[in-house]
Amino acid sequence: MSDSGTNQTQIGNYFIPDLCRGQGLLGIFVIAALSALLMALLHNGIGDFDFLWLGKIVLLIFWIALLSAIFLCRAQPYLLHLTLPRIALINYLLVLLAAALCAVTAEYWNNYSRTGIWRTDPLSILNIVLIAAIPAGVLLRLYYLQQLLHQQQKAGFEARLAALQATIRPHFLFNSMNSLATLIRIDADKAEKTVENLCDLFRYALKDSGSVTLQEEVDACQGYLEIEKLRLDERLEYSWDIKVELSDISVPPLILQPLIENAVFHGVQPAIQGGSIYITIYSCGDWLCIDLVNSLPETTHPRAALSEMTSGHQLAVDNLRCRLDVYFSGSAKLQETVFKNHYHTRILFKPLEG
C-alpha cells in the first residue's frame, strides 16, 4: 500500500485499529482524558484550576470519543473496498460529525439549564468542532503512518523469508531425485509409489506460503520417511512421539524435513547396518521443543562423527537458523550435540499468538 492510494484495502491492513473493544477503545479514552486535562490547564492554569470545568470538558470529550469510536467501527465494513486516502478522509469527517453532534447536544443542554430556552450558539459549536479536528487529524495520521511502517516491515520479512526458503528447495529436490533414481533400479512398483509421495512432498515444499501448521510439517516429514523407508528397507528405523496438539502451531515451512533428510543421508545411509531416527515433540513451559535423534556410523572418534555430520548439512542448518530467527523474531533456538554415537538436534521456539 502506498500514498498514491491505487491499491485496494483489505481487512488485514485496515489502518484504523479495532475501536469497538480492547486496547483500541482504551487508548481512545486515555487520549481523550489527556486532551481534556491539557485543555483545562490551558484554560485556567495551575493556580486557578477549576475541577468543575474539567469535569464538564472531560464529559464532553468522552462523549465525542465514544461516538467517534462507534462511527468508525460501524463504517469499517463499508470502507474496505476504498483506497487508504479515501478511508482516511471519511473517517476524519465521521469524527468531526461526532464532535458536531456532541457539541450541539451540549449547547442545547447548557443553555436550557441556564435560561430554560432551547437554543444554540453556532460559534461555540464551531469552536468545539475545530478543537476536536486537530487531535483527530494528528491521531488518524499517526495510525496511517504506523500502518505504512507495518506493511514495509511485513514486506521485508516476507521477502527475506522467501529468499531463505528458496535456497533449501534445490537441495531437497536434488536428494529426492537421487533417492528415486536408486529405487528405480531395485523395484519399479516401489518407485511408482515413491513418485506419488514425491508429488505430495513437492506440492508442500513449493507452497507459496510464509507459514504452515506444525501438523502439515509433520505430515510432510512422514511422507519423506516413507519414501526413504522404501529405498532403505530394514536399514532405516524411525519413530514419532508427539505429546502436543500440532494443528494450532504455526511454523515456517520445511523446518524439520531438512533435518530428517540430513539424518538419513549423513547418519543412517552411510552405516553398514543402517540406523534409526527418533523424533519427539513436546512442550516445556512457554517453549515448544522438537528433538531429533539419529544414530551415526560407528566411529572411534565422536568429534570426527560430529565433523562429518556438520560438514554434510551445514548449509541446511544455517538456512534453518536464519528462517527460525526471522519467523519467530529471535525467540527460537537450534541446538546440536553428539552423545553416545547419536546426533541430537533440538529446535526450541515460543509459538506465536493468534
Image (spheres, rainbow, N blue to C red):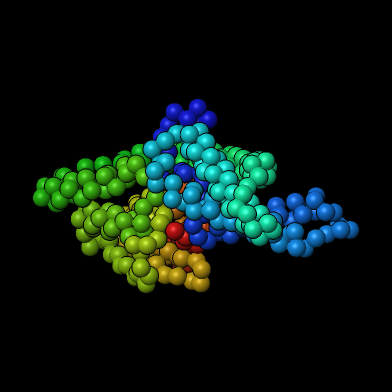
For this rendering, which residue is in front, 300 or 287? Answer: 287
Against 163, is 188 above or below? Answer: below
For this rendering, which residue is in front, 213 or 324? Answer: 213
> Going by the picture, which residue comes out furthest to the right?
47
Residue 33 visible in the shown view? no
**Residue at position x 57%, y 43% in the image:** 96
> Going by the picture, which residue comes out furthest to the front?
116
Report the side of 257 relative to 321 (left or right): left
> Going by the picture, which residue comes out furthest to the left?
189
Total marks in image? 0
Residue 47 at what x, y percent from top left? 89, 58
Residue 158 visible in the shown view? yes
Residue 3 at what x, y percent from top left? 53, 30
Residue 86 at what x, y percent from top left? 48, 34
Report the side of 224 relative to 99 (left or right): left
For this rendering, which residue is in front, 308 or 20? Answer: 20
Report the side of 223 relative to 28 (left or right): left
**Residue at position x 63%, y 51% in the image:** 107
**Residue at position x 23%, y 53% in the image:** 227
Residue 25 at what x, y percent from top left? 55, 57
For the C terminus, give its image quadrant. bottom left
**Residue at position x 32%, y 44% in the image:** 207
Quarter residue 31 falls in: bottom right
For this rendering, which residue is in front, 237 or 330? Answer: 330
